[in-house]
Image: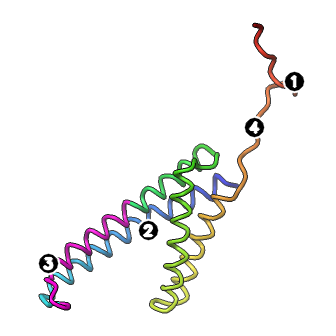
Amino acid sequence: MRRTVAAVAGAALLVEAVGLAVVHFVLGSVVDRQDMSLAGLDSGVMSGSTRAAGVAVGLYLLCCGAVSLRVAVRDRAPGRAGRILLVSCAVLHAVLATVAVGLVGWAAFAGLMVLFGLIVLTLTSEDAPVRRPEGGGAEPAPAA
C-alpha cells in the first residue's frame, strides 16, 4: 500500500510544484505591470521577489515529490533527510490548508488535507516484509 500512496503523493506534489511556480510567475507579471508602490517598495523588487519565491517553493515541492516517488520505487521508508523533508512538507500543507479555508474555501482545504494525508500515510506506513531465502531459515554463516 505504501508504494501506491507514495506514487500518488509524489505525482500530486510534482503537479503542485509546477502549478505554484506558474502562479507566482503570473503574480510577478501582474505586479510588474501595475507600476504601483507598496510602502515605498519598487514594483520591480516586488515582482522579482515574487518570482524568486515561486522558484524556491517550486524546487522545494519538486524535492518533496522526488523523495516520495523514490519511496514508491524502492518500497522502503525514506532516510533521515527525506523524512525531515516530508515532515516539513506535511506541516506546510497543514498550515496552507488552514489559511486556504478563509481565503479560497472548503474545496481548497479538502484538497490540501488529502495531500497532507497522503504524505503522512507515506511516512507512517510499514516497510514491505523482508523476503527470506527458500528453506525458511537464515542463510548459513561463511566458514572462517
Q: Amino acid at mark 4?
A: Val
Q: Is residue 98 above or below residue 141?
A: below
Magenta segment: 38-59
Camera-side mark, 3 or 2 = 3
Q: Amino acid at mark 1?
A: Gly
Camera-side mark, 3 or 4 = 3
Camera-side mark, 4 or 2 = 4
- State which tag comes first along the sequence, 1 or 4: 4
Q: Which residue is mark 1?
A: 135
- Circle 4 sits in a helix, a strand or a loop, which is it? loop
| Residue at 48% in and 57% down | 65
Q: Which residue is mark 3?
A: 44
- State which tag comes first along the sequence, 3 or 1: 3
Q: Which residue is mark 4?
A: 130
- In whole angstroms, how far apart are the C-alphas of marks 3 and 4? 56 Å
Q: Which residue is mark 2?
A: 16
Query: Magenta stretch: residue 27 in it?
Result: no
Camera-side mark, 3 or 1 = 3
Q: Amino acid at mark 2?
A: Glu
